Image (cartoon, rainbow, N blue to C red):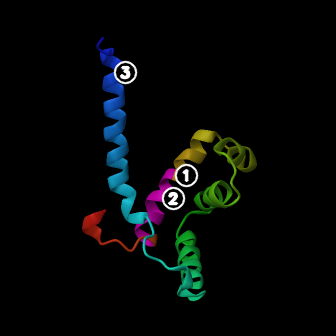
Amino acid sequence: MTPPRRPTLTIHVDGRRRFGRWLRVRHLLVVGRDSSDGPEHAVVDGADLRSALAALSPRQRACVVLHYYEDLSVAQVADVLGCAPGAVKRHLSDARARLEPLLTDAPEELR
């Protein structure tokens, strides 16, 4: 018995989208950093992160900190900031777009 066409197509399209997303973010994966490198890497990474966060608007920075560091959901961030969940999603998307080139070490041609 052959499988229905629509679910098969959906599975294929989803797989292609995932693969495309992976190609866009794979350079962000930290590879090869040894745990015996010492604390200086954590200090440098923290300074880089603070300077990158300073490049964001106050609303974008608040959304990033609440969502990623305080581990709040989009709805909870929206409640805290008194705005719509769609606005939080937009701020997070814009913030990721601004932070990615600042926090990556990959050459421009790999992005």
Q: What residue type is labelled 2?
A: Ala
The answer to if 99 sits in the magenta stretch is yes
**Which residues are the magenta region?**
93-102
Give the Cα separation between the discs numbered 3 and 1.
Answer: 34 Å
Label ID, residue 13? none
Assign a secondary structure to mark 2: helix
Are there few (<14), some (14-19), or many (20+) residues within 10 Å of tag 2?
A: many
Q: Residue at x 70, y 50 (%)?
A: 72
Q: Is residue 67 left or right of residue 55?
A: right
18 relative to 41 in the view: left or right: left
Q: Name the residue under label 3.
A: 7
Any magenta on residue 59? Answer: no
- Left or right of 38, for residue 110: left
What is the C-alpha distance between the residues marked 2 and 1?
6 Å
Task: Answer with left or right where residue 48 lies relative to residue 71.
Answer: left
Alpha-carbon neighbours of circle 1 within 10 Å: few (<14), some, or many (≥20)? many
Q: Position of residue 5 (x, y in %)?
A: 30, 17
Residue under the point 53% across and 86% down: 37
Q: Which is more N-terminal, label 3 or label 2? A: 3
Whether pointer 2 and pointer 1 mark residues with C-beta atoms closer than 8 Å, the reply is yes
Mark 3 touches mark 1? (CB < 8 Å): no
User: Which residue was labeled with disc 2?
Assistant: 95
Q: Nearer the viewer, residue 15 or 79?
A: 15
As shown in the figure, which amino acid type bears the numbered disc 1?
A: His
Q: Which of marks 3 and 1 is in front?
A: 3
The secondary element bearing badge 3 is classed as: helix
Secondary element type, mark 1:
helix
Q: Residue at the location (58% across, 88% down)?
A: 38
In three-dimensional space, the C-alpha distance between marks 2 and 3, rounded to whole angstroms, equals: 35 Å
- Tag 1 residue: 91
